[in-house]
Image (tube, rainbow, N blue to C red):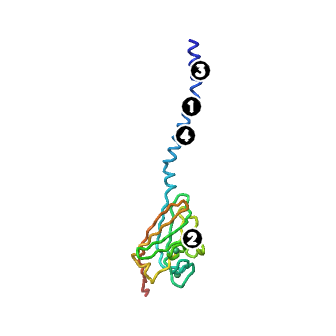
């Protein structure tokens, strides 16, 4: 009897630590799997953009591949807002109209420059010469685009403008807006006696 108890004790003494280690590994493994599938990590991988057309309210660029200067003609001006957990670094932007018209942030293409700034009157972020951009945007942050018009034809009401943004991880996201008609001015006349 004593021998059996001793044997059982020895067996438990040898097996228990191994079982505990295995259990710990299984828990760690389960946590790792849960971590991969968690909604928080899925959100971190998603970035979306919202874009609105503000009208031709600034003159920051000119028609041309590297024309980073005002020319006296107002430019189509758009505001872009990022939704992405942790923010993103923007490394390229391209705007396409459903009319013939494309603007981008590289002098390697013949498309006219797409001016980029963090605000309507902030300095342009495009690198002189190459037109390239490389700037970070916080989650919920925004930036502004300037695109030169062509014979008053690019920003007519109903035009669809599609922005494609490339981020530093190589991913791209698009956003679309439609040029709306300017809100007509309203005058109210009141007779006071
Ligand atoms: Ca201009
Ligand atoms: Ca270009």
Most foreground residue, 26 or 187: 26
Residue 20 circle label: 1
As helix, strand or loop, the secondary structure at mark 1 comes to: helix
- Mark carried by residue 119: none
Sequence-earlier tag: 3 or 2: 3
Q: Nearer the viewer, mark 3 or mark 2?
A: 2
Q: CA distance from mark 2 to mark 4?
A: 45 Å
Question: Would residue 145 be visible to someone looking at this image?
Answer: no
Q: Earlier in the sequence, mark 2 or mark 4?
A: 4
Task: Give the image location of residue 14, x and y in percent.
Answer: 59, 25
In the image, the residue with mark 2 has its CB under 8 Å from the nearest atom of ligand 2: no
**Which residue reaches farthest top?**
1
Q: Is mark 1 within 8 Å of ligand 2?
A: no
Mark 3 vs mark 2, CA separation in Å: 71 Å
Tag 4 residue: 28
At horizontal 45% and vertical 76% (from top left) the residue drawn is: 101
Residue annotated with mark 3:
10
């Amino acid at each position: 009897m004593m021998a059996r108890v001793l044997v059982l004790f020895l067996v438990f003494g040898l097996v228990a630590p191994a079982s505990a280690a295995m259990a710990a590994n299984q828990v760690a493994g389960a946590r790792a799997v849960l971590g991969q599938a968690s909604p928080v990590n899925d959100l971190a991988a998603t970035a979306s953009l919202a874009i609105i057309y503000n009208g031709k309210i600034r003159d920051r660029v000119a028609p041309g591949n590297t024309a980073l200067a005002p020319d006296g003609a107002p430019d189509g001006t758009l505001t872009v807002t990022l939704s992405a957990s942790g923010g993103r670094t923007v490394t390229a932007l391209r705007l396409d109209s459903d009319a013939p018209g494309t603007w981008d942030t590289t002098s390697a293409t013949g498309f006219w420059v797409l001016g980029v700034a963090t605000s309507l009157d902030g300095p342009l972020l495009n690198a002189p010469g190459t037109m390239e951009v490389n700037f970070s945007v916080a989650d919920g942050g925004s930036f502004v685009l300037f695109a030169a018009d062509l014979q008053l034809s690019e920003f007519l009401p109903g035009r669809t403008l599609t922005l494609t943004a490339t981020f530093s991880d190589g991913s791209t996201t698009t956003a679309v807006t439609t040029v709306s008609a300017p809100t007509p001015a309203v005058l109210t006349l009141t007779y006071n006696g």
